[in-house]
């Protein structure tokens, strides 16, 4: 049996997946990214190879790097953009999904997927950190909450207090002011989720991503954001069976499998 790897080196987390010849996931990992992308890739690949019973990533028939640090994956046969990899990862997980909102550590992307899992169109906001994973980390800090606690905070809000600042730095000080004024924290959180959902809506629309949509990236696990996006898009977001944070690595591994199998 041959094995194929995908390593997605993100700005905040590094993910790796190993597939067998049939496309079955035999190992996966998600680790906090180190300052050095190469070290992140080595740590993630060591972990998945161990899980799969391989001595190192050199034992893989084909390995593809993706993500922010895709050029730094040692032993990779090639690298592919994370946009293509997210599309393919989602396609093999659920072929009925036609569009993705991917909220990474430092950017937001809207992607529409073709019937074969390739990218039909995409739009990206990478100029500013507002509405990205780092933004949510900053917001959670303002509330003195962990990220999982913050992601559920807005779910019981009766009202939404709008957050007007688009910038992470200004939004953080606006939130601190609102908290200081004794405003309801769940309603402030609802305002934050809604502001981000509107940004996601713009990206999705630009990419022509209008129906059967899912969320990928670490922020897909944010329940409050998911609810806000459903409200703005007026659509139900499709939940993936596989961890949405693994989609980039899974897509890279699937591309590796297709290329490795054709090299017979």
Image: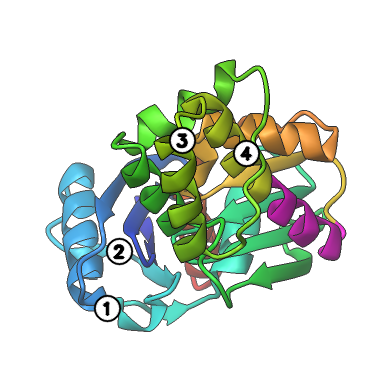
Q: Nearer the viewer, residue 236 or 257?
A: 236
Which residue position holds label 1?
Answer: 75
Majority secondary structure in the magenta region? helix
Q: Which mark is residue 60?
A: 2
Q: Are marks 2 and 1 in contact (CB under 8 Å)?
A: yes
Query: Earlier along the polypeptide chain: callout 2 or callout 4?
Result: 2
- Secondary element under disc 3, as helix, strand or loop, is loop
Q: Depth-wise, is mark 2 or mark 4 nearer the camera?
A: 4
Above or below: residue 61 compared with residue 225: below
Q: Nearer the viewer, residue 221 or 158?
A: 158
Query: Earlier along the polypeptide chain: callout 2 or callout 1?
Result: 2
Q: Position of residue 87 (x, y in %)?
A: 65, 57
Q: Depth-wise, is mark 4 or mark 1 nearer the camera?
A: 4
Spatial CA distance of label 2 from label 1 is 9 Å
Question: Residue 204 in magenta?
Answer: yes
Query: Which residue sits at x=43%, y=74%?
Result: 68
- Secondary element under disc 4, as helix, strand or loop, is helix
Q: Position of residue 193 (x, y in %)?
A: 60, 40
Q: State the extent of the magenta-drawn residues as a range.
A: 197-208
Q: Position of residue 224 (x, y in %)?
A: 57, 30
Which residue position holds label 3?
Answer: 181
Give left or right: position of 26 versus 216: left
Spatial CA distance of label 1 from label 3 is 54 Å
Spatial CA distance of label 3 from label 2 is 57 Å
Spatial CA distance of label 3 from label 4 is 16 Å
């Amino acid at each position: 049996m041959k094995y194929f790897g995908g390593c997605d080196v993100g700005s905040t987390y590094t993910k790796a997946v190993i597939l067998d010849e049939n496309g079955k996931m035999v190992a996966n990992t998600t680790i906090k990214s180190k300052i050095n992308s190469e070290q992140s890739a080595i740590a993630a690949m060591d972990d998945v190879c161990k899980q799969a019973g391989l001595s190192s990533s050199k034992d893989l028939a084909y390995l593809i790097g993706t993500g922010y640090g895709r050029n730094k994956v040692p032993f990779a046969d090639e690298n592919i953009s994370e946009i293509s990899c997210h599309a393919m990862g989602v396609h093999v997980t659920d072929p009925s999904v036609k569009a993705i909102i991917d909220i990474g550590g430092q950017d937001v992307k809207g992607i529409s997927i073709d019937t074969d899992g390739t990218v039909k169109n995409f739009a990206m906001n990478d100029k500013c950190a507002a509405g990205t994973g780092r933004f949510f980390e900053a917001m959670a800090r303002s509330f003195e909450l962990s990220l999982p606690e913050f992601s559920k905070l807005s779910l019981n809000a009766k009202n939404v207090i709008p957050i007007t600042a688009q910038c992470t730095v200004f939004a953080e000080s606006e939130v601190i002011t609102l908290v200081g004024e004794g405003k309801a924290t769940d309603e402030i959180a609802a305002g934050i989720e809604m502001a981000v959902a509107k940004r996601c809506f713009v990206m999705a629309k630009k990419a022509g991503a209008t129906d059967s949509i899912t969320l990928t990236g670490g922020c897909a696990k944010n329940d409050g954001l998911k609810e806000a996006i459903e409200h703005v898009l007026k659509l139900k977001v499709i939940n993936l069976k596989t961890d949405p944070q693994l989609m980039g690595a899974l897509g890279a591994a699937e591309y590796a499998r297709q290329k490795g199998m054709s090299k017979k």
